[in-house]
Amino acid sequence: MPQGKVTEVPDDGLTTRERRALPLLVVHTGDGKGKSTAAFGMALRAWTAGWPIGVFQFTKSPKWKSGEEAALKSLGSVHESTGQGGAVTWHKMGEGWSWLRTQPEDHAKAAVAGWEQVKADLDAERYRLMILDEFTYPVSNGTLDVTEILATLAARPGTQHVVITGRRAHPDLIAAADLVTEMTKIRHPMDAGRKGQVGIEW
């Protein structure tokens, strides 16, 4: 597709300006590295546009620290003190269950509580961009009902863009999304026994 040009113009009765303002559901999935990284890159653009941003991490332990969290929270502080950019809110909804040995019922409770918070914020139109990081896991494993999730997202009011990341996205989630990117791994340093690095993985 040529840069900035669509392949066809839909017969939806909308003007170009109206069509450009439609809310997007975005899914970043696949086994390759970069799903969350790409989502946080979108958050940087959103912050520059002055949008309020909500990040919801579904499988990260509250004890873990990441570079993108520190950077975006710092930008949130810039907004609070100067009015520049947009507000940033960061929620760690999970218990680190993708890596740590915690009880399955704890994972489910955390995921359900996280989704309830997301629904409340969607209803309140609290954010212009919402990132549901690692959200594919509680959806694909059946902890959360994909039908209810899709109905909630389809009925969200206003212009709220939602970005979902994680491996093995549910087929129904992929079918409903406006933008789907699959990160395909060709090579990774861990294949050669190398560990993750500060500034690269977190």
Image: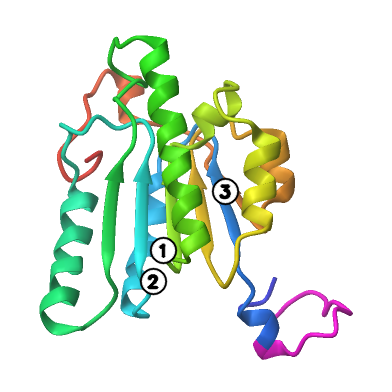
Label 1 crowd bin: few (<14), some (14–19), many (20+), radius 10 Å: some
Amino acid type indicated by mark 3: Val
Label 3 crowding class (10 Å Cα cut-off): few <14, some 14-19, many 20+?
A: many
Q: Which of the two residues, 10 or 193, is positioned nearer the viewer here?
A: 10
Q: Residues within 10 Å of mark 2 (few under 14, many from 20)?
A: some
Q: Is residue 4 visible?
A: no
Sequence-wise, which precedes: disc 1 or disc 3? 3
Residue designated by label 2:
46
Is 34 magenta? The answer is no
Please name which of the two marks, 1 or 2, marks the residue nearer to the observer.
Answer: 2
State which region is magenta.
Answer: 5-17
Q: Which quadrant is the N terminus positioned in?
A: bottom right
Q: Are marks 1 and 2 in contact (CB under 8 Å)?
A: yes
Location of residue 128 in the rendering, given as x and y in whole percent from the top left corner:
45, 69
Judge whether residue 184 can be spotted in this image: yes
Q: Residue at x 62, y 53 (%)?
A: 153
Which residue lies most toward the right here? 11
Per the rendering, the mark at residue 27 is: 3
* Disc 3 from disc 2: Cα separation: 17 Å
The x, y position of residue 20, in whole percent, is 63, 81
From the top left corner, tell me how far across and down residue 142 is, in percent.
Answer: 60, 22
Q: Which SS class for mark 2?
A: helix
**For this view, does 186 lie left or right of residue 52?**
right
- Classify mark 3: helix, strand or loop: strand
The amino acid sitting under disc 1 is: Met
